[in-house]
Image (cartoon, rainbow, N blue to C red):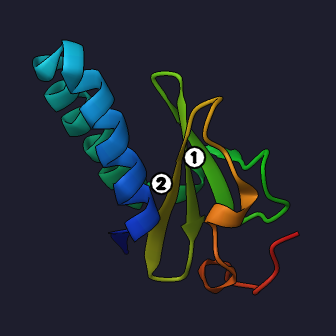
Amino acid sequence: MKIEFDPEFMVALIVQLDRIAEDKPNAARDFKQALIAQCKSLVDMPYRCRKSIYYDDEHVRDLVFRGYVIVYVIHDDIIVITSLINQQNFSSKRISRSHFPSGNVD
């Protein structure tokens, strides 16, 4: 199993890192390294995180990390990291239908 980062996730991450780096550049670097490590650790046990509270699909999970929610979708051979959510930036449209194994977004 491998990890894939959705482009929208990467944009959200870069925006958040820029915000953190304005005051604390070292904290931004540490945040990024720890977040990426947490995402990569999902390959060992992808269903360890809670079922998503945003989507009604067993294959969509929420990794809670330092006050953020990282939404990811589990496929047979790949985990797609789709969203970086804090209380200000969530939109259910961020996960496209192609990310869902069943094709449903309910």
- Kind of residue at disc 2: Met
Q: Is residue 6 visible?
A: no
Q: Is residue 68 above or below residue 105?
A: above
Q: Amino acid at mark 1?
A: Arg
- Quadrant into which the N terminus falls: bottom left
Is there CB contact under 8 Å for labels 1 and 2?
yes
Q: What crowding class fits label 2: few (fewer than 14 Cα within 10 Å), some (14-19), or many (20 or more)?
A: few
Give above or below for 78 relative to 35: below
Residue beneath disc 1: 48
Percent from the top left, x then y, of residue 59? 68, 67
Q: Residue furthest left?
A: 26
Q: Residue at x 47, y 69 (%)?
A: 80
Q: Is residue 45 above or below residue 85?
A: below
Residue 96: x, y in percent?
64, 76
Q: Which mark is residue 22?
A: none
Looking at the image, the residue that sits furthest to the top is 23
- Nearer the observer, 62 or 20: 20
> Residue 75: image x %, image y %?
56, 78
Q: Is residue 62 left or right of residue 105?
A: left
Q: How many marks?
A: 2
Residue at screen point 55% across, 59% down: 72
Q: Determine whether 84 is above or below 2 in the image.
A: above
Q: Between marks 1 and 2, how big is the CA–CA gap? A: 6 Å
Residue 20 found in image quarter:
top left
Q: Is residue 20 left or right of residue 60?
A: left
User: Is 73 positioned to the left or the right of 66 in the image?
Assistant: right
Q: Which residue is mark 2?
A: 45
At mark 1, the secondary structure is helix
Where the C terminus falls, by quadrant? bottom right
- Residue sitting at 57 percent across and 69 percent down? 74
Q: Where, by quadrant of the figure, is residue 26 drawn?
A: top left
Task: Say whether residue 39 is left or right of residue 20.
Answer: right
